Structures are given as C-alpha cells and as structure tokens.
Image: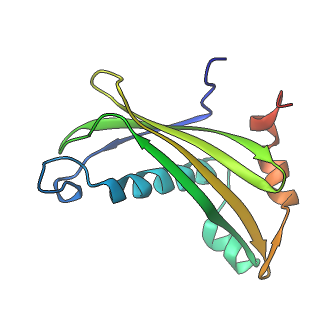
C-alpha cells in the first residue's frame, strides 16, 4: 500500500543543530517532527494556545524513530505526515526526506492522546477536524 501523506513541510538544517560529527543531532529530529505536527494543525485551523485555554491538551504518549540517512548543515528536507486513529490515540506517521535526492532520512511514529481538563479523554473536536484525513480507514 502506498503511503498517502496528507501534509508536507519544507525545512532547512541550521548549523547549530549539528553535532561534532557534522550531522544533525538526533534530538533535533523531535523538534522537526513536532514543528511539522504543529504546522499541520495550524493549517487545519487548530491553535495549540486556544486549545489549552479551553482545557484541551494534545500530548505525545510515545515516539519511535528509525534513523536512515543523516542530514547535514544546509540540507533542505521535507517533513511529511499522515495519521490514523487507534482507540483514543491519534498516531502520526512522520517521515523525513532529504530534498536534494528524496532519500529517506527518518521514519517515525508519534502516538498522541488528548488530556481534557486534566483527564485522559477522547476528543470529539479532533474526531471532527481529522475526519477528512481518516476516511477509508478500517
């Protein structure tokens, strides 16, 4: 089955994100992934700050990352995602590709849950917002 990405963000590696080996430090990939999810949410009209004011906090429950090819300073890359719903979790499948040759850099899975007024809960709001992106899921 072909991957059906629903969002893509182009970014560029900054010098300070690299370690002594001249490659992006592993911890920075989490920043790239989070920034991509936040930009995706913004693109569908969701404000993290407004959600928090309403007592709704989407949070990361688990992240897995498989590093395939390193990025270096100045590299442009594409951070892509699609998502699925599994019970009360929204699972973001996020992959990063180097822009110059479309080589896979990182494969990741980010499991998120919603905490509403301090309690783990399902989110009717996210069910509604994400419905167009989840069509056809079994």
In the depicted structure, whether residue 88 falls above or below residue 79: below
Q: Nearer the viewer, residue 17 or 44?
A: 17
In the depicted structure, whether residue 76 falls above or below residue 22: above
Position in image of residue 14 (x %, y %): 22, 52
Q: Residue at x 34, y 36 (%)?
A: 77
In the depicted structure, whether residue 114 falls above or below residue 134: below
Quadrant, the N terminus? top right
Quadrant, the C terminus? top right
**Mark count:** 0
Position in image of residue 65 (x %, y %): 47, 47
Q: How is the image coloured?
A: rainbow
16 left or right of 81? left
Position in image of residue 68 (x %, y %): 36, 34
93 left or right of 30? right
Position in image of residue 6 (x %, y %): 62, 33
In the depicted structure, whether residue 52 falls above or below residue 30: below
Q: Nearer the viewer, residue 133 or 50?
A: 133
Q: Residue at x 27, y 39 (%)?
A: 70
Q: Residue at x 23, y 38 (%)?
A: 75
Q: Residue at x 70, y 79 (%)?
A: 53
């Amino acid at each position: 089955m072909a991957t059906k990405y629903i969002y893509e963000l182009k970014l560029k590696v900054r010098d300070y994100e690299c370690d002594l080996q001249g490659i992006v430090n592993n911890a920075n990939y989490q920043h790239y992934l989070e920034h991509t999810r936040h930009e995706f949410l913004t693109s569908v009209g969701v404000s993290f700050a407004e959600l928090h004011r309403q007592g709704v906090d989407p949070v990361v429950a688990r992240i897995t990352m498989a590093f395939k090819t390193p990025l270096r300073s100045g590299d442009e890359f594409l951070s892509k995602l699609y998502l699925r719903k599994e019970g009360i979790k929204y699972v973001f499948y996020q992959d990063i590709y180097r822009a110059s040759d479309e080589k896979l850099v990182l494969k990741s899975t980010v499991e998120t849950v919603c905490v509403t007024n301090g309690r783990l809960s399902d989110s009717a709001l996210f069910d509604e917002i994400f419905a167009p992106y989840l069509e056809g899921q079994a």
